[in-house]
Structure formats: C-alpha cells, structure tokens
Image (cartoon, coloured by chain):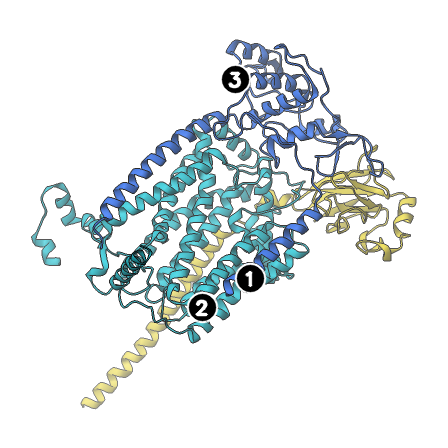
Chain colours: A yellow, B blue, C cyan
Amino acid sequence: MDKIDSKNKKTVSSVDEDKRDFLFVTTAGLAIAGGGVTLWSMIDTMNPSKDVLALASTEVDLSPIEEGQSLTVMWRGKPIFIRHRTNEEIDDASGTDVTNLIHKATDESRVKNPKWLVVVGVCTHLGCVPLGQKIGDSKGDFNGWFCPCHGSHYDTSGRIRKGPAPLNLEVPPYEFVSDDIIRIG
Amino acid sequence: MLNKLSIKIVLLFLFLGVNNSHSASEKMELIEQNWPFNGVFGRFDKSSLQRGYLVYKEVCASCHGLKHVSYRDLTGIGLTKDEIKSIAGEYILMDGPNDEGEMFEREAKPSDKFVNPYENDNQARLANNGAYPPDLSLMVKARAGGADYLFSLLNGYKDFPEDFEASDGMYYNEYYPGKQIAMPSPIMDDIVEYNDGTDATHVQIARDVTSFLAWTAEPELEERKSLGVKTLFFLILLTIMLLGVKRKVWKDVN
Amino acid sequence: MKNNNENQEQKGVTGWIDKRLPIFTFMNHNLRDYPTPKNLNYFWNFGSLAGITLVIMIITGILLAMQYTANTDLAFESVERIMRDVNNGWLLRYIHMNGASMFFIIVFIHIFRGLYYGSYKYPREILWMLGVVILLLMMATAFMGYVLPWGQMSFWGATVITNLFSAFPIIGDYIVTFLWGGFSVDNPTLSRFFVLHYLLPFAIVGVVALHLVALHQFGSNNPTGVDVKSENDTIPFHPYYTVKDYFGLGVFLIVFAGLVFFAPNFLGHPDNYIPANPLQTPAHIVPEWYFLPFYAILRAVPDKLLGVLLMFAAVLVLFFLPWLDKHKVRSANFRPFYKQFYWLFAIDCIILGWVGAMPAEGIYVLIARIATAYYFSFFLIIMPLLSKFEKVSDHLPSSISSAVLSKKFDNSTKESYVK
C-alpha cells in the first residue's frame, strides 16, 4: 500500500509541476515581452523625431538654375552646393588627368548627370565653407571653389587641386526624382 | 637604474617633440604688453577704458557688434548714468509689435544690449565681401594670447611680401593665422580725437581699444581679483590654524 | 547588541530618535570611533577631498541650472548672462568649471595612491571596482557638462567623441543617430546632455555611498600594506583624521581658489568662448586635459574601431587589477621592482596626456604608440609576471605599530649619528 501510495503521489505532483512550470514560464515570458515593448517605446523617444526626420532628405527643383549658375541648399545642417555646369566646365572636369590629382577620382564617378554637380560645401581641410557659389566670388585657380580660410582650390568637379585639404568635396547621397528634381538624402 | 633610464628616454622624447613643434609652426611671438589688469592685484585703467570705448564707438562699431554688453554696463568704465543714457539714445533699434501689430523703431535705453551694426549675420557678410566681422564682446577671451594677441594684430599690418600669393581684397598681417586678413588696418594716427589730451598715436589707440575689449570680455575682473586676494588671505590663515590644531591633536600619537 | 538597544534609551531628543532610528549610533560608529590605521600619510586625504569636491560640484551645479537654458539658440547667451548679470554668477561658474578639473586631479591622485599601496588587493576588490565605476560616471558627466556652454570646443568635442561610436560595424551609425537624436549634434543632443549631466552626479553619490560601505567593511589600507593586527595599530577617526582632513581641505581650497580667482581659464580653451558654429571647425580639436591620455591612446591606433576599443579598454582594464596583480605584498614600499615600473607608469600617463594635446602627426604618433604599449603592458604583462617572480622583501614589517616604531628608531639613530 505504502509503495503504491507514494508512487501515486509522485506522479500527481510531477504532472502538477509540469503544468505549473509551463504557467510560470509563459507568464514570465509575457511580462518580459510587455516590459520590453514598453522599454523600447521609451528608448525610441530618443531617436530622431518627426520634425528632424522631415529635414533628413530634401527635394530641390533644379529648373530655375541657369547654366553656369549655382545654388546652395541646407541639408542636415550642412550647405550643399549644386552647380549647373557649362559644357566648357564639364570638358574641363572630365578631361583632367586623374593620375596627378591629390585625391584621385574621375568626374564620371562624382556625377549622376554631367550637367549637374552636387557636393557638400564643407572644405575637407577644417570645415570652412568655400567661396565660389555667388557671382563675383573668387572661384580659385581651377574655376570651381576656393576656401578662404587656408587657400584650398577645388575644380569644377569639386576635386581638391591645390592647398592643404586632403580630400575632394564630399558627394552626398542623392537621386534624380525627375529630370528637374533631385532628392538629397 | 630603471628609473634613471626611463627619465632619460622621456627627456629625449620631450626634446625631439619640442624641436618638432618649433619647426612645424612658424608662429610669430606676440608683442607682450605690461597691461595694468595683469597680475594678482590687476586693475583696469579707467581713463584708458574710456578712450578705448571712444575708439570702439567711432572705428570698430561700424562693423563689429558687442552683443553681450549692455549700455548700463558702461558704469564699469567710469561713465555716469546720465552719460550712459545719452549714449544709448544715439542708437535706434527695432521693437514691437505695438498695439496695432506693427514693429516700430525706438531709441535704445541703458538696459538694452549694444545695438548691432547689422541686422543679421548674412547682411554683415554681404557688406564685407563675405568675411564676417566677429562680435567683439569676448574677443580677448576667445583668442590664445588674449590682450597681447589683439594688440599685436592691430600693430601687425604690413605690405605683402614679394613671394606671398595674395588673394583679392585681403591684407597682410603677421599675427593672423594664415597671415591674410579681410579687415584692413582699422586704426592710424589721429583717427580719433581724445578729449583728455592724450596723443592719439597708432600704438596708443591700439592699447586703449585692447584694454576696453579686455574689459568687455571680463567685466568681473577687478571684483574677481580683489575677492580672490581676500579669500586667499582668509584660507591661508585658516589653514595655518588648522595645521596647529592638527599638530596639537596628533601630539600624543606614538 | 540588540538587547542593549532595547534596554537603554539615551536621554534627550537624540536618544529618543536613536532608539527608533539609529542614525546617531551609525554616525558615531562610522565617523567617530571608526578605528583607522594610525600611519596613514597625506595621500589618504584625497578620498575625503573627492567627496567634498563632489558636494561642491553638485551645489554649484544646481544653482547654475537655475540660470542656464539648454537650447542651442540660447545656451551660449545664458552662460554669458550668468557671467555678467547674475549676482556672483562668474564665481559660481568658475568654481564649477575649475571644480571639474580639481575633481579629476584629486581622483587621479586617489587612484595612483591605490595603485602604489596595493589598495585594490584582497579583501578590497569590490571597493576598488566601485571606484572604477565612479571614474567612468565622472568621465561621462564631465564630457556632457563641457558641451553645455555651446562654444566651438563644446560642439566639436561632442561631434568628435559621439562620432567614435560610428566605428562599430553595422550598428555604429545607428548608435550615433540615436545619441544625437538627429543627424548632427543639435538641439536634441544638447537638451539630453543637460538632463544626463544633471542626473549622473546623483548616481555618483549613490556609488560613493556603496564605496564607503565597502571601505568600512575592512577599513582603510595603510602605507605598509600590512593588515591591522591589534588595537595598538589604530586610532579613532575622530578627532585624528577629521582634523587631518580639515587641514588637507584647507590646502586644497587654497590651490582651488588660486585657480578660480586668478587663472580661471588657464585649463580651458579660448575657442570655447566662440559660439558653436556647425559650419566651421576649429583648427585643433582638443578635449579637456583630463581626457588627453585616453585621447592619445585613441589616436595612437591607425584603425578607428581598434582605437576606440583600446581607449575604453584603458579604463576597463582597471576592473581586473585585483586579478592581474596577485602579489602577496600590497605596498610598493616593499616591492622594489614593482615600484620602478609604477613610477615609469606614472610618467607614461603624463606623456600620454602631453602627446594627446599635440597634433597627431610625425614623432607624436610614435611616442603615443610606445606610451600606449607601455600603458597596457604594465597591467597585462608586468603585473602578472611580477606577482609570480618578485620576492617578498625582508623589510616587510610584521605589524603597523612595529613599522612606526622602527621608523622612529631609524630617525633617532640617524640624528645621533649626524650629531
């Protein structure tokens, strides 16, 4: 009798335990999942907000820019230089011997449509904003941009040609939405 | 043994490093002046500050703002309340909107900040060939070398050397980083007329306006130094007494 | 003990309170009777000094926060308003600004004290590790505090340091955007840095409390590194160490006041009096002096990610100190070899600080690399090797009292010899 009894007890309790374990694990799992979701929603408030994201990419209408003119737009707190290049400027840029450049890059690798050059207008030396956007600005020895801070000269492809800057003007990520409109970012 | 060796190695590196830094940057030694506001007991020379203010007002103020300073602060250079009121009245600033919702112009009051020569930074840039004339309120604190740098800069204009590649509209100044500066030499002999009889020489003007800008950067300087002397006196006395107490308490330990 | 408490109620209000809430017993036990080794030298002042500096920083910080505006358009101006228009505002700000530097000087000395006298060894491992946590929290707090005035160095320092996280593969850029709350250091960054700069000091207070609990578990280490053996070795904390700490505080305040009143911007950088301008980078971006050694380690490595990891490792390695140095003797006074390497290490840290302020080019890179190599080999190679091979010195005293006595004896014999 004793033996059977104890056996019975054991099986009953072990079934019970299994059930309990399952309940414990699922309850704890659910609670943790709920806590995790709540925690994430809190942490996520620190990510860029809607008004910040609204400025993360910017669309620019290129149609009012005449050939030979330039436009400066702000994107993520940085100036973006957009230049409508003349044929002469395009020939200048693509005809340059790449091997002699400080930072070697072909003109083709820096434009999507050779008529339009889009670069970040921050000198790669120490972050000044180069001149050359406005009519009457000094465009430097290579007819592109000239940084007044320490005298870096950039060519019509935004490539560094002379002066202390180590790199070409950065090309931001952008795409042509239509023939006349680009989206930067 | 090891210690001595390591010190030798360190000294060697220090020597190499110092040498290197000398050759890398050929910076000009600043002209050092014995400013009355230097040192532990330093004080401003009020009459120099007032002359310096005149120079600022008649020369610098056409391009450079002083936006952190209010007219009322001019009591600090020894002007009376009435004088300040009439000085402030010379300036016009935009206020509003009024009851009709219009912006209107009014005379500045002593409680106003110095009125800026330009409405905004872009206008300032446009008027100066793209070079922005910086605000002068903190200039002395914001440059390595402080007053000496400013004084050197004002005395550092020269003609471009033969081999220097000069840019259009730039001027040569030995003390300016890059040696090309967009501001032409702002002062010359007798560009202002001092009413206290001081000779308005180039050097005197540079000295006065530098003193004035040292004051705009650190108007608290006199108060700070005199409070500092008192505080140090108090602390040294207290510390000496504490040392006595400590010795007395510790006398019987072993 | 418990019985005593129940039976005896001291007279007066304090007795009544103490029976119900034993704070007076607690204070008496920890600040008055607390048995302390009688041979502590002045390097043991720096712990309490650090605590006092923390309090100074919190008080001045709270008062500054009442006047400061955490907005990119207004921050610089609000600081200038504090400097010019707020009553004694310049004093408040200069104390807070230079207080940060003083705090680091004190804590660095405190750490080097611990390194020299082996204060991190059994049974004080957790005490030491809590200290490293405090150091980390201090660094984070100081870094974020430096951003608040929104000058050029504030902005570009924040940009450079937060950009370090972009070195991590895949998630790097995401982390940086998250830290910024945007696509560059901007208003969201400034306001969260302000909030955290206000919050973290209170976290430091919490860890300091734990640090003290751990300290009082086994009591202070001492210059001989020998454990307290009997009551002869100790004296009560009050009045002996309270007056000694007061005197030390006086000396500290003289140095502090000298800096605040006569050279308030000596340790700062002139560029931080130029308002932040995202379109113009200063010629040299230099962190505050207390970060320079770590900055040097960062730049010593050509690979960005490895540099970042090494920089963090430079602090984190301190956590493992109790297991890297397992030599039985605590005090470097009785470890002739360790002592040599220790001083070399101290010089090494100063070299790292100096090279961190120099441009990362030419000879400086080489110096930084050698110094970085020594920094890590001191912990990871020299310490474990020494714990194996360095012999225990014959001069090691058997107890604190005997050390004190023999020193006296030495001195008196020397004196008589001179006479």
- Is there any visible trace of residue C68 in the rendered image? no
Using the rendered image of the protein, determine whether residue C254 is visible from the camera's viewpoint. yes
Residue C310: which numbered mark, if any?
Answer: 1
Residue B157 is situated, as x and y percent measured from the top left of the image, at 74, 29
Q: Nearer the viewer, mark 1 or mark 2?
A: 2
Vertical comparison of C192 with A18: above or below: above
Chain for numbered disc 3? B
User: Where residue C108 sits: x, y (%)?
Assistant: 44, 53
Q: Secondary structure at mark 2?
A: helix
Marks 1 and 2, how far apart at CA: 27 Å
User: Where does the N terminus of chain C fall, quadrant-wise?
Assistant: bottom left
The residue that mark 2 highlights is: C337
Determine the residue positioned at 35% across, 32% down.
B234
Give the amino acid type for the residue marked by disc 1 in the picture: Leu
Residues at marks 1 and 3, CA–CA distance in whole angstroms: 53 Å
Q: What is the crowding at mark 2: few (fewer than 14 residues within 10 Å), some, or many (at least 20)?
A: some
Residue C162 screen position, x and y as percent: 57, 51
**Residue, disc 3:** B72
Label 1 or label 2, whichever comes before in sequence order: 1
- Whole-Å distance between the Cαs marked 2 and 3? 66 Å
User: If the image is split into quadrants, where does the C terminus of chain C sit?
Assistant: bottom left
